[in-house]
Amino acid sequence: MSIDKRPSRALRAGAAVAAAALFAAACGDGRPNGGGGDEVVLEGVDDGTTLTMWTRAATEAQSQALVDAYNASHENQIELTVIPTDDYQTRVGTAAGNQELPDLFALDVVFAPNFTTAGAYLDITDRIDSLEFKDALAPSHLDVGTVDDRQYLVPHTLDLSVLFYNKDLYTQAGLDPEKPPTTLAEFAEQARAVDALGGDVSGTFFGGNCGGCFVFTWWPTLWAEGAEVMNEEGTESLLDSPEAQELYATYRGLVEDGVVAPGHNEETGATWVSLFPEGNIGVMPMPSTMLGLMPEDMNIGVAPIPGLTGGQSTFVGGDSIGISANSEHPNQAWDFLRWSLEEEQQVEILAANGDVMARTDLGDNEYYADNPNAVIVNDLVGVGRTPYSLHFGQTFNDPQGPWLPLVREAVYGDPNADLTALNEDVTASLSS
Amino acid sequence: MSTKLWSTSYYVLAGGLAVLFLFPLIWTGYASVAPAGATNQQDGFGFGNYASLLDYDAGLGRYLWNSTYVSVLTVAFTLALSVLGGYAFARFTFRGKDTLFIVTLAILMVPYSTLLIPLYSMLGDLGLRNTLTGLALVLTLYQLPFAVFMMRISFEAVPKEIEESAMCDGAGTFGVLTRIMLFAVWPGLITVGLFSFLAAWNDFIAPLILVSEADKAVLPVAIANLRQQSMGAIDFGATQAGVVVMALPCLVLFALLQRHYVRGFMSGAIKG
Amino acid sequence: MRYSRKLAGALYAAPVAVFVLVFFVAPLLLVGRMSASDWPLLAGDLGINMPDNYAGIADNPLFWPAVGFTLKYTGIVVVLLIGLSLLLALIVADRRKGTGFFRTAYFLPTTLGLASASLLFFGFYSPAIGPLDPLLEALGADPVSWLGTPTAALWSTVVLIVWKFAGFFMIILLVGLQSIPPDVYEAARLDGANRWQSFRHVTVPLLRPALGLVLILSVTGSLLAFDQFFILTKGGPDNSTVTVVQLIYREAFQRFDLGAAAAISVVVLAALVVINIGQLRALRKDHQ
């Protein structure tokens, strides 16, 4: 259970492999050794091993499709366990502390640094290097899975923040339904125009008591403007910058004018995406995976999140996946990862289902040809960002973290408040 | 106060409270079949949310079976332990009695999230991790404080004379327990069984942490999987359908057991 | 005889004792060790670091506000819950027309898990999908932000908990009422006691053991409140509804620090043991 036992554990595993190799040699069986240990087989091993894999419920559909296709075409068989999203960290954290992780496990990208630096994942730098399409893998996911130039994770499923807008409401409000906002000011203007329709219709919506929602939907505006949210190491907050203040002020104006649908102030994230599909919201940023959940008869447009004065960006969320450090079948596990990233699976499984692919070089495929919204999303993978910090979750996602007080003061508090002290609290949490 | 006025005010109060208690549940039942965005029932009224629950992953049948198995096992463990323990606490003095009682009650006082991690390691040492039996043992643990306390006060309420007359007839303490006392504490027994069933049936965190194989998952875990979308969003259609599916068996169970809670129901049995 | 009765008692208590020792005391000792160690969730035991985890509790700016809020919440819930569940038990105790229906109605919320019930109320209070705002609108009133202010969030959660648990405590009290022999009431009636007097002087004293159980369960349960706030308010708005157990959860699963989480748990356990021994003593003293 303790970390200092690990070397002995590795040693024992190594001894077992050596014994097995000796045994195999003695029997004149020339089969490559597939089980654990030091021997890395870059192309992976498919020898009928049963592998275990965990994923969170939010990305179950994609994981299940990949696993089913892999099991149907391979000797190896993967047993997938789906874990409720909100409790995924609890479950994986408990298993990691006891070295009881499954062979493969996916993880929300923003929490990846906690697990990579704690040694929960196997170093797969050489394996990733052997992929001929390595440079096409979603770059922000790779960056987040890298520690000291060693790589531990590959992209698994992607979920990007993009603007959704209701074309019918746009038409009713006299806006051009083919001209989504290209600056934050235009966003506010269009939201106000739709809001003016009155009745049950509101201009926009956001999760005003949900740190993760703010991060996911608002930060791209800063990145699109060329501003940063943290320093490169993820230890210092820059969230009181002039750009950030302008972002807050714009949304504050929308709140003051009643353009935001009721309930934003107390929205903890559980219902923040259920309003738009009801058809009464003009325009709002939401996760790209919501595209598949929209009513079929609803006339929806999708657009990149604009900066203050132009540009575009996105928060590249979703899951990365790696091989657990305690896996006894790393070569077999890698066989699945390598296979899942190949063109055929990316196109025939992910793109065919309207999902975003883990690679940036396959956008020109037959499925996206009929699905312009998916193309817009997929093109953002290359320019989008995934922020890196070892203390990301406890600072930004945790409702008791210091980010929520900062952004709530800026949006709901004293309009002339000085955000310096609150920003210092964020820095203190990031660097603790 | 006249009997009629008393009776009217009784029904106004009782009925008003019933409306308040039922309203959120009626709303849930209604909303589970009503159309809503971002759910599996988008157009018109229908059972789309239930259909998605029925077909989810291993299928509703498997989850129902697992949940039933774990709950029944928990009820059996809890009843066996609490009847013996409650009898000991109510009718005997022995060394360490007060300490054992307080320690048993203290199970209630340690937050779930702290105790589950040591339990997880320990079940691994006992070879019970990832088994439904291990899960039932942990769920029994959390039922013990209530169950033992409840059985203790139930046994204490039985008049001593009943027991003594049986003793004079030559029955041993175990004979008295099985032949007389169990019938005298019947409402307490029903209550302990009912509540340990409900707690095991609805528990979510223990199976989540202690059982990781997909085909051993219980109903609350499957429903939690079904309702959670990306970025913390909740599929309320799945949630509401899940609440209804989870509650129905409990409702039937209560309907079958509730006649045991009428005042005077047991007095005949004791005297007879 | 005396000796053998002691032995018999110990034998009946033995299964509980063994079970509690294996499944509770042993894990609890590990919690104690965690609280004295540098123990990251993901890495495991890194050695003793006393008294860092305990000293850290005092440095946590959320700790004392959380203690204050938890106590306030507990006070409100315990009073309302015991009062209402006693009323419900009295309503449905006798065989009367319609009591079967009322009993089932009051009991129904108890069949839900706390997490499901909290989610249900989250939707119920939600301006997006809940039925309350349309209802208020139909009555000509303005919509209410049920979870938007600290006061509203507290009382909305109290309503959920009273709704969810009143039926549970009603059943415990019903069992207590059943154990009161009918001839006691008969005697009181012959003495000329009215309904209130027989309630005050017969029912309440004889119901004391059941009320004691209800008191201990509701006090302990409320002091350890977690799911309801975690789901309904996430501790908000503006950290106004953070409970002590939420801090434990945050240390363990947001900050990955099991040592700190275990230290708070040990402090909470110690406080609860003292509170409950006090309650048990008080109940016993009154009884005598």
Image (cartoon, rainbow, N blue to C red):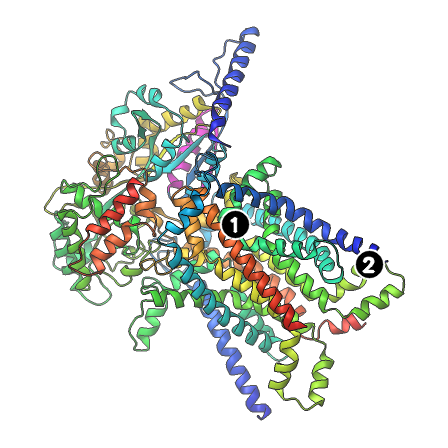
| Dot 1: element | helix
Instruction: Judge from the rendering whether residue B168 lies leftward or rightward of residue B259; answer left or right.
Output: right
Above or below — where is B76 with respect to C80?
above
The magenta span reads A59-85
The percent coordinates of residue B269 (x first, y second) are: 77, 70
Numbered label tally:
2
The residue under label 2 is: B173
How many C-alpha atoms fall within 10 Å of the one at disc 1: few (<14), some, or many (≥20)? many
Tell me the residue at 53%/64% (across/down).
Answer: C218
The local secondary structure at tag 2 comes to: helix
Query: Is disc 1 in contact with disc 2, using a CB cutoff of under 8 Å?
Result: no
Q: Is residue A190 above or below residue C127?
A: above
Q: Nearer the viewer, residue B180 or B2?
A: B180
Specify the quadrant of the image occupied by residue B62: top right
Q: Closer to the camera, B147 or B25?
A: B147
Q: What's the CA distance linking mark 1 and mark 2?
A: 41 Å
* Dot 1 and dot 2 within a common chain: yes
The residue located at (80%, 64%) in the rendering is B180
The residue indicated by pointer 1 is B219
Q: Which residue is the extreme one toward the right? A: B169
